[in-house]
Amino acid sequence: MTGREIRELLDHAGVLPSKQLGQNFLIDPNMARWIVSQLDIS
């Protein structure tokens, strides 16, 4: 699912993320993979 598709679904559902509430959404799968690769879990 692309970022645009996610935004369209949220809009259709009447959901508006709020930066004031600290709502941030990770929609880039490459960035998610990079974040996980940086974890030092033992």
Image: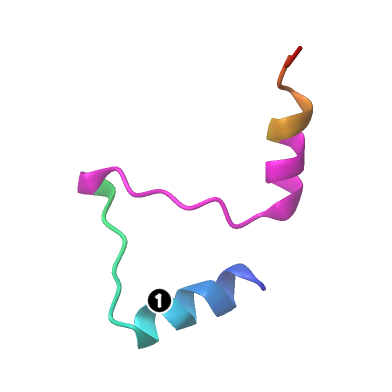
20 is higher (above) or lower (below) than 27: above
Residue occupying the point 36% across, 81% down? 11
Place of residue 34 in the rendered image (x, y in percent of width and height, measured from the top left): 75, 35
In the image, residue 27 lies in the stretch drawn in magenta: yes
- Residue 35 quadrant: top right
Residue occupying the point 34% across, 83% down? 13
According to the picture, the residue beneath numbered tag 1 turns out to be 10
Place of residue 32 in the rendered image (x, y in percent of width and height, measured from the top left): 68, 43
In the image, residue 11 lies in the stretch drawn in magenta: no
Display colour scheme = rainbow
- In what quadrant of the picture does the C terminus appear? top right
Place of residue 36 in the rendered image (x, y in percent of width and height, measured from the top left): 72, 32
In this view, which residue lies farthest toward the front? 42
Left or right: 33 as drawn, with respect to 1: right
2 is higher (above) or lower (below) than 8: above
Left or right: 19 as drawn, with respect to 11: left
Residue occupying the point 73% across, 14% down? 40
Place of residue 39 in the rendered image (x, y in percent of width and height, measured from the top left): 71, 21
Q: Name the residue type under label 1.
A: Leu
Task: Tell me which segment is drawn in magenta.
Answer: 20-34
**Mark 1, other Cα within 10 Å: few <14 / some 14–19 / many ≥20:** few
- In what quadrant of the picture does the N terminus appear? bottom right
- Residue 28 quadrant: bottom right
Mark 1 falls on what kind of element? helix
40 is higher (above) or lower (below) than 27: above
Residue occupying the point 73% across, 16% down? 41
